[in-house]
């Protein structure tokens, strides 16, 4: 063999760099990697080398062939592009297509806003599992087995004992098992319920809140939730605390705001009541404290939970919950 593969490679690359037309490059392709090309012949002659040199020579030749082929292809493309530009078939003065810029999803925006409000109030933020045990989702929250309140939750069961969490409230238990009071925390996350229509989707977002300390009273609950609602809706909108029931709070209250659409006159959105429900809340039930071994003679607390999509719908005047999940750019870019 007259030439080493290194020499062949060097010559090939130099000739390729100096080529000035696609035809020249095609000729170089024949010269080096064609049927009788230098590299092809080198590969064919490897069998005449001493046996111990064959593997490394074969490898070097194959690498060289790939390199030469790739470089020729690249150069031909460059030359063809340049020809297309100079012949006018590519108009380089046309404005480019701008990449569309995304924006935050309304659910993310509300979540962020809620987090900011609570950070200013000195709350921590915690998260937890979406696949939960019956114990955390129900039992520890004072939903005994066969309690009718379990029916309100439209649970997705993974097995008899494992569920997709139906609310973020199980995080209250997880936090209290790990920490001692004082506790001030919010817990945002996805929740799941077997329900689907104009105003329900099988997955939605909640933010849970929990405050536990000495001397926490209903006035603290009212103060924090009033601040929250005023800041979310950017105005001192009227609130109403309406008696309600949740197994894990006593007393319990649902929080309504004056209808943002009709301002209390009554309309389709508020079902003619003049009020819109935005939150569930209450004082932590002593049975819940007992489940996490908190001394109920020392500590009291309040909790609350709200649906993030619902707040976003009211705040931005969105009438169909499904819009949140379709990822339509025209919808999303409005926020
Ligand atoms: N977990 C309740 C639900 O999903 C909402 C809720 C109500 C949370 C009252 C609370 C609370 O923390 O105190 O419907």
Image: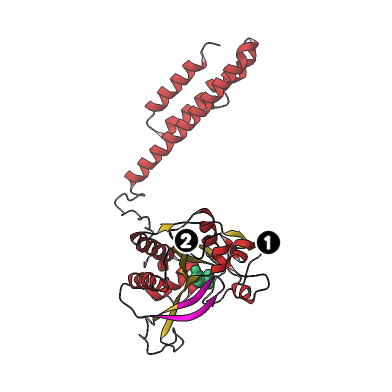
Q: Residues within 10 Å of mark 2 (few under 14, many from 20)?
A: many
- Residue 255 is left or right of residue 249, and the answer is left
Q: Which residues are magenta?
A: 233-254
Q: Which residue is mark 1?
A: 161
Magenta stretch contains residue 241: yes
Within the image, what quadrant is residue 272 found in? bottom left
Percent coordinates x, y for residue 323 in the rendering: 47, 71
Magenta stretch contains residue 3: no
Visible residue check, residue 326:
no
Residue 331 or 95: which is nearer the viewer?
331
Mark 2 or mark 1: which comes first in sequence?
A: 1
Percent coordinates x, y for residue 116 in the rendering: 35, 61
Percent coordinates x, y for residue 239 in the rendering: 38, 79
Residue 187: image tag: 2
In the image, residue 47 above or below residue 225: above
- Residue 266 is left or right of residue 131, and the answer is left
In the image, residue 274 above or below residue 69: below
Q: Say which element carries label 2.
A: strand
User: What's the distance in space between the residues labelled 2 and 1, CA to CA?
Assistant: 23 Å
In the rendered image, which quarter contains the C terminus? bottom left
Q: Residue at x 49, y 76 (%)?
A: 252
Tell me, yes or no, whether the two marked residues, 2 and 1, touch with CB atoms within 8 Å.
no
Visible residue check, residue 156:
yes
């Amino acid at each position: 063999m007259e030439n080493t593969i290194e020499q062949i490679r060097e010559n090939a690359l130099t000739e390729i760099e100096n080529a000035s037309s696609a035809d020249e490059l095609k000729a170089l392709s024949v010269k080096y990697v064609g049927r009788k090309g230098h590299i092809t012949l080198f590969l064919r002659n490897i069998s005449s080398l001493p046996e111990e040199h064959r593997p490394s020579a074969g490898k070097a030749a194959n690498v060289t062939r790939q390199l030469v082929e790739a470089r020729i292809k690249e150069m031909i493309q460059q030359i063809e592009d340049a020809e297309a530009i100079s012949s006018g078939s590519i108009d380089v003065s046309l404005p480019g297509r701008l990449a569309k810029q995304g924006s935050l999803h309304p659910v993310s925006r509300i979540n962020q806003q809620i987090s900011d409000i609570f950070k200013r109030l000195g709350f921590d933020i915690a998260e937890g599992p979406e696949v939960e045990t019956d114990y955390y989702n129900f039992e520890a929250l004072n939903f005994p087995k066969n309690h009718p309140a379990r029916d309100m939750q439209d649970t997705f069961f993974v097995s008899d004992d494992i569920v997709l969490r139906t609310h973020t409230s199980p995080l209250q238990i997880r936090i209290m098992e790990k920490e001692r009071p004082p506790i001030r925390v919010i817990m945002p996350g996805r929740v799941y319920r077997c329900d689907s229509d104009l105003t329900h989707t099988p997955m939605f977002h909640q933010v849970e809140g929990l405050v536990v300390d000495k001397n926490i009273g209903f006035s603290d609950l009212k103060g924090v939730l009033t601040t929250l609602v005023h800041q979310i809706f950017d105005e001192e909108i009227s609130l109403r605390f309406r008696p309600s029931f949740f197994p894990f709070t006593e007393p319990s209250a649902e929080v309504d705001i004056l209808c943002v659409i009709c301002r209390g006159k009554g309309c389709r959105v508020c079902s003619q009541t003049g009020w819109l429900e935005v939150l569930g809340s209450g004082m932590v039930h002593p049975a819940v404290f007992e489940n996490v071994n908190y001394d109920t003679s020392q500590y009291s607390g309040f909790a609350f939970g709200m649906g993030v999509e619902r707040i976003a719908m009211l705040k931005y005047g969105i009438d169909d919950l499904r819009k949140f999940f379709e990822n339509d750019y025209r919808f999303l870019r409005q926020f």
